[in-house]
Image: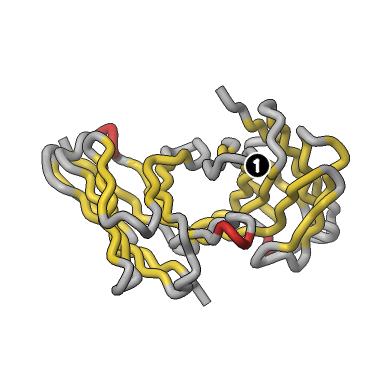
C-alpha cells in the first residue's frame, strides 16, 4: 500500500515551460512534506519543503502548493531549464513518528532545450 | 558540507552470499537510514537508527539486518542475498534537530 502517490511518472517539457508534479497522501497525521531532487549517479537532495499550516511556499523557480482538505500537494517548476532535468520525489512524514519519510514513486523530468 | 559516503558504487554478488553495505557520515548525525530505490516505487525505508546500537524496522525489513556500533557508521547486512534484492541502496543521515536527510550516492547491488 503506497501511502504517497505521485504522478506523472515522467514528464517532458520545453525550456522555459512549467513542470507540474502532483502527489496525494492518505495519512492525515503527516505534518511535513518535502520534495527531493535526484540527478543521475547521485543521491537525492532536499529541494524544498512545506508544513500543512501554509498553502504555498516558493523558493526561486520552485513552488509547492498544498491542499490540506484534498490531501494533495504539488511541485511547480517555473521557467524550466535543461539543468532541472532530474528525478523528483515527493515525501511525507509525521514528527511524532520520528519523521520517517514515506516517498512517492518519483517523476523523471526532461527539459528539452 | 555534510558528507555521506557508501563503501561501494557497484556490487555484484551471488545468490546466498552474505552482503555488507557500509555507510559513513561525517556530521555527527544521530539518525541514519537505509533505503532501497526501485523504479516506480520510489525510496522505501528498510531500517533506521536513532542512536548507537539502536535500530528500528522500516517498511521493508524482511531479509535485511543492520548494525550501528559507532555513531558515524551504519551497516546494512543481507544475510543470504536473493535475486529480488537486486536494487539501488541509499544511505541517509539526519541530525536530531533538523528534518533534512542527507543522502549518499548509492550502491547498485546486483544479485545473480
Is residue A8 visible in the rendered image? The answer is no
Q: Foreground residue, A28 or A3?
A: A28
| Residue B78: % across, % down | 79, 56
Please give the name of the residue rendered at 69% of the width and 35% of the height, measured from the top-left corner.
B29
Please give the name of the residue rendered at 42% of the width and 50% of the height, measured from the top-left corner.
A34
Furthest residue in direction bottom, as rendered:
A1
Q: Is residue B58 above or below residue B92?
A: below
| Residue A110: % across, % down | 26, 45
In the picture provided, is B102 more to the left or to the right than A39? Answer: right
Q: How many residues crowd around disc 1 within 10 Å: few (fewer than 14), some, or many (20 or more)?
A: some
| Residue B96: % across, % down | 65, 42
The number of numbered discs placed on residues in the rendered structure image is 1
Please give the name of the residue rendered at 43% of the width and 46% of the height, measured from the top-left corner.
A36
Type of colouring: secondary structure
Is residue A36 visible in the rendered image? The answer is yes
Q: Is residue A70 above or below residue B109?
A: below
- Per the image, label 1 sits on a secondary structure element best described as loop
Q: Which quadrant does the C terminus of chain B fall into?
A: bottom right
In the picture provided, is B28 more to the left or to the right than A104? Answer: right
Q: Is residue B6 above or below residue B75?
A: above
Please give the name of the residue rendered at 79% of the width and 54% of the height, measured from the top-left corner.
B55
In the picture provided, is B73 more to the left or to the right than B4? Answer: right
Q: Foreground residue, B37 or B53?
A: B53
**Residue B102 picture quarter:** top right
| Residue A35: % across, % down | 40, 49
Furthest residue in direction front, as rendered:
A53
Residue that carries the numbered disc 1 in the rendered image: B96
Q: Chain of mark 1?
A: B
Q: Foreground residue, A49 or A47?
A: A49
Q: Which quadrant does the N terminus of chain B fall into?
A: top right
Q: Foreground residue, A39 or B59?
A: B59
Amino acid at each position: 500500500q503506497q501511502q504517497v502517490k505521485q504522478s506523472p511518472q515522467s514528464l517532458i517539457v520545453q525550456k522555459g515551460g512549467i513542470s507540474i508534479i502532483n502527489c496525494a497522501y492518505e495519512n492525515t497525521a503527516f505534518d511535513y512534506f518535502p520534495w527531493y531532487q535526484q540527478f543521475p549517479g547521485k543521491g537525492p537532495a532536499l529541494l524544498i519543503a512545506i508544513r500543512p499550516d501554509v498553502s504555498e511556499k516558493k523558493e526561486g523557480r520552485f513552488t509547492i502548493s498544498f491542499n490540506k482538505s484534498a490531501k494533495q500537494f504539488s511541485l511547480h517548476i517555473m521557467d524550466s531549464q535543461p539543468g532541472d532535468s532530474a528525478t523528483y520525489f515527493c515525501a511525507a512524514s509525521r514528527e511524532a513518528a520520528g519523521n520517517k519519510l514515506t516517498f512517492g514513486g518519483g517523476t523523471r523530468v526532461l527539459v528539452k532545450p | 558540507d555534510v558528507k555521506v559516503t557508501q563503501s561501494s558504487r557497484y556490487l555484484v554478488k551471488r545468490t546466498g552470499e552474505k552482503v555488507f553495505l557500509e555507510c559513513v557520515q561525517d556530521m555527527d548525525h544521530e539518525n541514519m537510514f537505509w533505503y532501497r530505490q526501485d523504479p516506480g516505487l520510489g525510496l522505501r525505508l528498510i531500517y533506521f537508527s536513532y542512536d548507537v546500537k539502536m535500530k528500528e524496522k522500516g517498511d521493508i525489513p524482511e531479509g535485511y539486518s543492520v548494525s550501528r556500533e559507532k555513531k558515524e557508521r551504519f551497516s546494512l547486512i543481507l544475510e543470504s542475498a536473493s535475486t529480488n534484492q537486486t536494487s539501488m541502496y541509499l544511505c541517509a543521515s539526519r541530525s536530531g534537530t533538523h528534518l533534512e536527510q542527507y543522502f549518499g550516492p548509492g550502491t547498485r547491488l546486483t544479485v545473480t
